[in-house]
Amino acid sequence: MGLVDTVIKDAAPRVFWTDWTLWPDGQTPAEYPSLERRTTADILIVGSGFTGLWAAVLAKQENPGCDVVLTDAQTLGFGATGRNGGFISDSLTHGLVHGAHRWPGELPLLLALGRENLAEIAAFVAEHRIDADLRLVGKTNVAVLPHQVDELRQTEKLHREHGEDVSFLGREEMRADVASPTYLAGLRIRGAGGLVDPVRLAVGLRRVAEGLGVRIYENTPVTQLERATSRVLAKTDKSVFDAGQVLLATNAFPGPLRRLRHFVLPVWDYVLVTEPLDAERRAALRWPQAQGITDAGNQFHYYRLTRDQRLLFGGYDAVYNFGGGGSEQRESSHRMLAEHLFTTFPQLAGVRFTHRWGGMIDSTSRFTPFFGTAMGGRVAYALGYTGLGVGASRFGALVGLDLLARRTTPRTGLRMVRRHPVPFPPEPLRWPVVEFTRRALARADANGGRRGPWLRLLDRFGIGFDS
Ligand SMILES: Cc1cc2nc3c(=O)[nH]c(=O)nc-3n(C[C@H](O)[C@H](O)[C@H](O)COP(=O)(O)OP(=O)(O)OC[C@H]3O[C@@H](n4cnc5c(N)ncnc54)[C@H](O)[C@@H]3O)c2cc1C
C-alpha cells in the first residue's frame, strides 16, 4: 500500500474541530431543542454559524431588551464555521491585493474597519475567557513557482504602503523559518490576523449569547418566509417563528430567500489533519512561530498546526459540481492533498492522517460578502465570504444589524455593502462557465502566472472564481 493510501485507510471521515471524542469530558457542547410550537421574536436570526452567532451577541449587547432568537437547520458547526482552517484575518476584501484592485478609493476605510473588527474579536475572546487558541501571529504566503516570487515582492510593497509589518524572505531565509524544499520565497505578514480554533470560538460565542438571553433552536430549518402586515412569518416544517425582523445568515446553503442563490456559488473545499506530530517530526519542520501558511497560486493550499501539534492541510482543489451539490468526502481530493503534503514536507513521510472532511466555500463573483434587505426592510442578509469569513463574519453581522435598524454607518456607506456582486449564470450554464474559469486559472498557474484572455476579461470587471 502506497504512502497516500494510508489517508483513506486511517483518516476518519469527520471534522477534527467537532470530533467530540477529543474534547475533555463535560465540555462537549449541548444540543438545543427544535422548535415544536409557534413562537415570537423581535429579531430572528437564521443560521448559527459565525455570522448568526455574532449577530445574536451584538444585537443583545446593543439592546438587552430585544428578544433575539437564533435557529439553525442543523447543530453547532455544521456549516463552514465548523469546517474551516481557522485562519482569522482582518481583511474584509479577500486580501489586500484584491481590495486595492476592487475598491481603491475606499481601501483606507475598509482597512480601518477590518482592523477594528479583528481587534474587537480579540478583545471579546479575552473578556469572555474563550479558550479558542486565538493566536494573532499573522501568516506567511509562500512562493512555490518562480513567477510567484515577483508577485510576492509586489505584494510586499503594497502591504508596506498600507502600514503593515511584512518582510520578504528569500529562498534560504524562508526555508530556515519553515523547512520545505518547495519554497522559493515567502512573505511574512506579522499582523493582520492569525489562527483560531473555530469551533471553540463558536462554542464561546454561543455561551455568551445564551448568557445574554438569546433563545437557541437547532434542527429547525426555516423553509419559507412570509410577510404578514408588520411581521415576518418564518415557517419551519413543524411550526412558525413570528418575528418582527429576520436576519439571514445561511451562507452557502440554499436559504429561504431564493434570489440570493444567484449570487453564492457553493464550492467544495477539502481538508486533511494528521495525528499529533511527535517531537522529532515537529522539530524537522522548524516553524518556531507556528503561523498559518498559504501558497501564492490561484489554486492554493493553506496549512497550519493545531494546538495539539497536528498538521491541518487543505485547499487547492476547489470543486463546483453541476447544480451545486457535493459531498464531504472526495477521495481524489483527499489523496491529492496527501500527495501535496508529502511534497511540501517530505520529512513527514509515514505520518498518519486522522481526519478528512470537506465543506462548502461561500463564493461570490467578487470574493467578498454581500448584503441587502427584503420584505420592506424587515429581512436583511449577510453572506458570501468566499473562504475568508472567520473574521469578516463579525463585520457581516454588524452590517446585517445596521440594515435592520435602517441606520447609516461608515459600514453601510461602503460600495461593497451597497452593491451586489455580479450574479452567476443559472444552470445549465453555470457549471461550464465555472469549469472553464477554473481551468483558465490552473493554466495561468502553470504558465508563469500569465492570465489568458478569459481571465483578463473577468479581471476588467473585477469578477472571478476563488475559494
Ligand atoms: C473547508 C473550508 C475552509 C475554510 N477556511 C477558512 C479559513 O481558514 N479562514 C477563513 O476566514 N474562512 C475560512 N472558510 C470560510 C468560513 O468558514 C466561512 O466564511 C464562515 O464560517 C461563514 O460563516 P457563516 O455563519 O456565514 O456561515 P456557516 O458557518 O456556513 O453557517 C450557516 C448556517 O446556516 C444554517 N442554515 C442554512 N440554511 C438554513 C435554514 N434554511 N434554516 C436554518 N438554518 C440554516 C446552516 O446549518 C449553517 O449552520 C473556510 C470554509 C470552508 C468550507
Image (tube, helix red, strand yellow):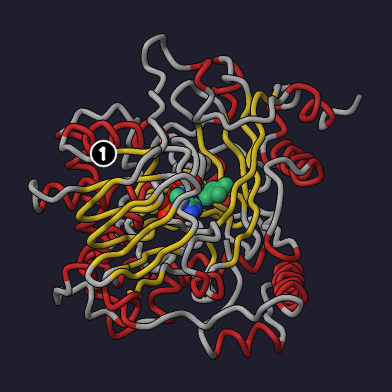
Q: As drawn, is 255 to the left or to the right of 92?
A: right
Q: Position of residue 223 (x, y in %)?
A: 49, 56
- Give the vertical position of 350 relative to 159 (above or below): above
What residue do we see at 15% from left, 37% from top? Answer: 212
Quadrant occupied by the N terminus: top right
| Residue marked by disc 1 | 215
Could you say which is closer to the camera, residue 225 or residue 268? 225
Q: Position of residue 227 (x, y in %)?
A: 34, 70
What residue do we see at 39% from left, 31% from top? Answer: 33
Q: Position of residue 31 (x, y in %)?
A: 41, 27
Q: Is residue 95 visible?
A: yes
Q: Is residue 172 visible?
A: no
- Give the vertical position of 423 relative to 316 (above or below): below
Q: Residues within 10 Å of mark 1 (few under 14, many from 20)?
A: some
Disc 1 marks a residue whose amino acid type is Arg
What residue do we see at 22% from left, 40% from top? Answer: 214
Q: As drawn, is 184 to the left or to the right of 429?
A: left
- Give the vertical position of 440 relative to 171 (above or below): below
Could you say which is closer to the camera, residue 328 or residue 152? 328
Q: Position of residue 174 (x, y in %)?
A: 52, 46
